[in-house]
Image (cartoon, coloured by chain):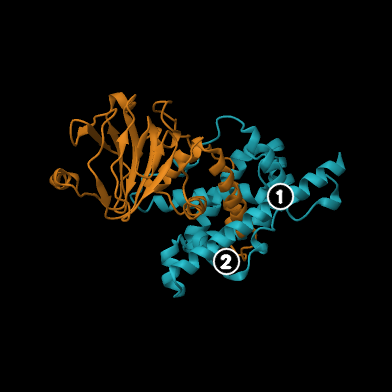
Chain colours: A cyan, B orange
Amino acid sequence: MSSQNSNTLRPLDDLIIRIANNQDQQAFIELFEQIGAKLKAYAIRCGALDGEAEDIVQECMLTVWRKAHQFNPKTASATTWLYTIVRNKRIDMARKTKYDVVLSDDLWPEPEGEDLETDVARDLEGKIARTLLHGLPEEQRQIVYKVYFEGKSHSEIANELDLPLGTIKSRLRLAMKKLDTLAQEQMTWLIIILLTNF
Amino acid sequence: MANYHPSDELLMQFTAGQKHDALGVLVACHLESCSECRKRTQVFEQLGGELLDASKEVKFSNGFLDSLLNKLKDAPPKEVESSGDIRLPRPLRRFIPGYFDTLPWSGISRNIKEFTLPFSDERYTAKFYKIAAGKELPIHTHKGNEFTLVLSGQFSDEAGDYKEGDFILADTDTLHQPKASKDADCICFAVMDAPLKFTGFFGRMLNPFLR
């Protein structure tokens, strides 16, 4: 990939690959400096206290160190991969203070084999990121935030925003449609880029 | 390939890490066999990545990075060995002491057996139901939502025919009488947020036993 094509995500990819290949501590520090504070912010928005959020980030970064070899830039962008790690650690850390029995490993078992069909899709998606969220109108984005950070259901969101349930449902439906279109558009562009590059 | 799928709302909540409970296990089992829904969750994961990337940064306490670097040398924690029967969906394996034929089923009636799963909580009750081949459940409705995944065999009701991998939501508006297909017992994984409510005369007599 030419440097012209690189956006802020490419260095993260490279850093993770350097950690995987060389146990590169300098790359690990750089990765932490770029993403650590965002991981912490994510955990806090999901309801963790400051100290808990630091524990979650610590577990995330240790997982990155140990499982960097599982990162495959062809199947997910670096931020998507890091997102799945922080999501799972948050679940498992929250679990320690309750009596929940379901672990993130139960919900997302490590892949047993390569899924070629979805690999291709992920390859295409991974190369242009950061467009889905920005493509959503504010009123739809607000609902997405509430689902991701607060775990709210449609009816809870409707209560909170004092809007009819039908409005929330149709806004989310519109958001889904928009996401689908955006995801497809990205793929179309990527196919064009790939075709012209090779 | 399954014909009935979870809603986008549920898939998004699951991908957001907000369904780490019995319902999450049910969704995870469906995803294992449904590449279509897996693709949808990939879009939601990407959206999660973007939310992470767009997060405002929060500073760390002093010495956080040094203490993190010191831990890199620590031995990694032991992975939980995946055990259980490989014929079961992976999200269930850790919880089930054997395969369907060796489970300690308890009888609701001669034709309907159930097995309560160990990850029920204050919100959801999780069970396996086994309907004998060609037999049907008494007609019933639901006090809340019932999410069902067909694990083995097939069943049908007034609204459709369901086979392995299908994900069905029944709610308070659903009045149905699921019937297993003639050729095999039907085993379903069901997650309920309220008990079933049988409506027919014999069904009403069953109600007290199903609490």
Above or below for A43 versus B33: below
Q: How many marks?
A: 2
- Crowding around mark 2 (Cα neighbors within 10 Å: few <14, some 14 to 19, many 20+) is many
Q: Which label sits in the foreground, 2 or 1?
A: 2
Residue type, mark 2 in image: Gln
Respond whether the residues carrying marks 2 and 1 are from the same subunit. Answer: yes
Checking the image for residue B73, the label placed there is: none
Chain ID, mark 2: A
- SS under mark 2: helix
Identify the residue at the far bottom of this view.
A162
What is the distance, in whole Å, between disc 2 and disc 1 at their CAs? 29 Å
Query: Quarter of the image holding residue A115?
Result: top right
Q: Nearer the viewer, residue B123 or A68?
A: B123
Residue beneath disc 2: A140
- Looking at marks 2 and 1 on the same chain, the residue that comes earlier in the sequence is marked by 1
Q: Nearer the viewer, residue B68 or B53?
A: B53
Q: Is residue A76 visible?
A: yes
Residue type, mark 1 in image: Leu
